[in-house]
Amino acid sequence: MPDTIRITQGSMGVCWWRARRAAHCALTHALFRKTGRHLSATCAITATILGTAASAAKAAAVPQIGTVQAYMEAIAQLDSHEIVALALTLGILCFAVVTAILLVRTRRRLAETEQAARDQALALRARADRANALLQSEPQVVIAWSTIDEEPEVIGDPGVLTDAGDHLLDFGRWLEAEQARAIENAVDALRARGVGFAMTLTTPSDRLVEADGQAIGGRAVLRLRNVSGIRRELGDLRLRHHRQIEENEALRALIDAIAVPVWARDGNGRLTFANKAYARAVDARDGAEVVEHGIELFDHAARTALEEAEHSYQSYTGHLPAVVGGERRSFAVESVPARRGSAGIAIDVTEIDRLRRDLDRMLEAHRRTLDRLATGVAIFGANQKLTFYNAAYRSLWDLDAGFLDQEPSDLAVLDRLRANRKLPEERDFRQWKAALHDAYSATEAREHTWHLPDGRTLRVVTTPNPEGGVIYLFDDVTERLDLARRYDALIRVQGETLDNLAEAVAVFASDGRLRLFNPAFAQLWKLSGPALAERPHIETVIGWCQPLSGDSALWQRLHGAVTAIDDRASVSGRIERRDGSVIDCATVPLPDGATLVTFRDMTDTVNVERALREKNEALEDADEIKVDFVHHVSYELRSPLTNIIGFAHFLGDQATGPLNDKQREYLGYITTSTNALLAIINNILDLASIDAGAMTLDLSAVDIRRTMNDAAEGVQDRLVQGGIALDIRVAADIGSFTADERRVRQTLFNLLSNAIGFSPAGETITLAAQRLKDAVIFSVTDRGPGIPPDVKDKVFDWFETHSLGSRHRGTGLGLSLVRSFVELHGGTVTIDSAVGIGTTVTCIFPLGQRAERPAA
């Protein structure tokens, strides 16, 4: 079928109508052309006839006969206008006759022409149907452009090619971007310059479309046709071949750009390709020179194993040495067999081997370092097997080294720890374990806190290992958390304490600015809390405080203590404010360079101190008066008392004269009372002598047992009178010691008298002595009411006496003398008493006394 026939079945009727209209136009044009010629001829003939008739009428000189003559005469009678009208009428009649004849003939010819046009249209329709059938026999679409600006005529169904529909010319919709640009450029060139083209296109659905563009009959024609069958196979092969060429070129360019030697050999082992890196390694200009001269990278000895693998069509992997640039290098060689020959690559691993050795040494040092850490470290590989653990890890979990050296799995270790109850108690152990093992697929380190059943708290960090696996770090943070809790509690307690202190406290930093203060500080100096929160300088604070305190030298010392760098001595002093209050100030240097300043309101204390000082002075004066009075009275009473005792003795003597029984009884009472009064006066005088430092000790060897018996004999009457027993406990060989025997006996006598006074009837008093290496200890124990704690500190004072519910009545001088006599010997007196149980008084006399010892 000729390429000029490019119509569809739908366009056949249009073509037939155009042909018929053209035939009608041609026939009508011929008819009017012929009719015009006839009309012109008729008019000419009529005019000739009329002219002849007119000429004949004017001839009138020749008479005619018959009808002709009559007509001629009638014509002769007409004027020229009537002749013209008559001629015109005759012409019109002739024209009408001729026109009717011609019209009949034209209609006959037109019918013949129309029949011929109809026959021709039918023939053209049949021919168009055959052309359309031929076009539809192949899945194709024909697009034709008459001019550049004219809309294209699309012949065929676009659906057979693509799903783009009416947007077939929008190539970007059904082609890839590169192919769409290519065909758009080709179509533009075809429409503009008539440049033909032929190309094969591939749709995204892998459908092949053949595009053929040609200029035919002044029109640009594009034919798009599906490729199938052998043509499709050829197209596929062409496309694959093109792709293979592109891939081969890309691979060659890539291999040529690789910085490691790459080569290819044929079946005979000859080099057929070498990249630039290979050429540089063998000092060749390029790969072509290497192939041409067969330059080998490895020497024959190193190449033997490689050649054996190539000849046996096997792969080869190994390390081979080679000299590159005058330096011996190590290459990791990989050779693989091909269908015809082999291909190989050599990677320079000299630096890698050196780095691997360095890495092994570093890893070994790293492992030794980890083994000395207090943090437990366990490294599990990508297969979740234990690859390393340190001593702290084994000690932390108390695991057997034999078990760990077998490289157990992570699950096995966790199961053993769980069986030993060393893991946190979890409700869902499987879920907890799965969450822990998420570290094997994590990209960042994660931190966990384990609270173990034994009370320990561990900080567990799981870190992904760059080589695969997980690194576990176990830190025992029990003490740290405990210290943190204590520290937080201490800070809170300190804060609360500071805020509730009655003292005003301020802390100035090393730069002299206020860093910390309590509410008492702001209240004491009437300062604003927000203003102090701005951390004012010490100079500003002093300026705020001086209106209340005035210019005091203490402020300058305080300023120097806060801002000093080297000499940070403490400063203390007292500020008397204008409002009458008294403030004690003290500074304490802190270790961090800050200075603690305390202000204490001492107004009440100072007032009380002043009052107490005045009262104390009055009491001291009264005490001196009392002592002087006692001394004076004692000395003054002793002389008349001695006289009374002497005269009573004389009265009792038979030489003086007889006395009746009543007088003798009264004289006994006088003697007893005067002896008691004399003992009291002697005690007062002894205490006064001791207090005045005028008493001396008469030191000599004192028999301990005999002295105890003498003291017991002095209270024998009182023991019998009170129904009390005395138990003397002393070793037979206790011996003697150096002391004032009279004062020791007087001490024991006073202790026994005091114990008898507080012991109820029927009880036993114990007098014991014990000799130690450096002292002799006397003790007197009674079963009396005991001494309350508030009274114990007063029992050694003068004239302090407490009956404590007993029958004892005394002057309160016995224990005072006991302590004074024992202290004169360099010893001590202690009292051990419990209310309701009894009292034990212990006197300790040190050994090694001098022959004479002055009073204290």
Image (cartoon, rainbow, N blue to C red):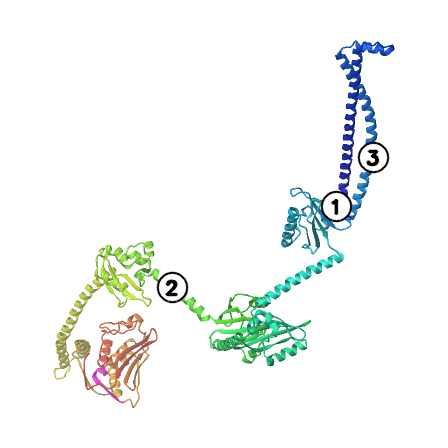
Residue 734, given in percent of the width and then of the height, sits at 29, 89
Determine which of the numbered discs, if any, sits on residue 493 in the image: 2
**Local crowd at mark 2 within 10 Å, few (<14), some, or many (≥20)?**
few
**For residue 455, side relative to residue 141 (left or right):** left
| Mark pair 3, 2: CA separation | 126 Å
**For residue 24, side relative to residue 333 (left or right):** right
Q: Secondary structure at mark 1?
A: loop
Q: What residue is drawn where x is 74% and y is 45%?
A: 6
| Mark pair 1, 3: CA separation | 27 Å
Q: Is residue 830 above or below residue 446?
A: below
Tell me if I can see residue 759 in this picture: no
Q: Secondary structure at mark 2?
A: helix
Camera-side residue: 728 or 740?
740
Residue behind mark 3: 115
Q: Is residue 847 above or below residue 568?
A: below
Which tag, 3 or 2, sits closer to the chain's start? 3
Q: Give the extent of the magenta segment.
A: 735-746
Look at label 2 and name its amino acid.
Val
Q: Nearer the viewer, mark 1 or mark 2?
A: 1
Residue 187, given in percent of the width and then of the height, sits at 66, 49
Residue 630, given in percent of the width and then of the height, sits at 16, 72
Residue behind mark 1: 4
**Local crowd at mark 3 within 10 Å, few (<14), some, or many (≥20)?**
few
Look at label 1 and name its amino acid.
Thr
Which tag, 1 or 3, sits closer to the chain's start? 1
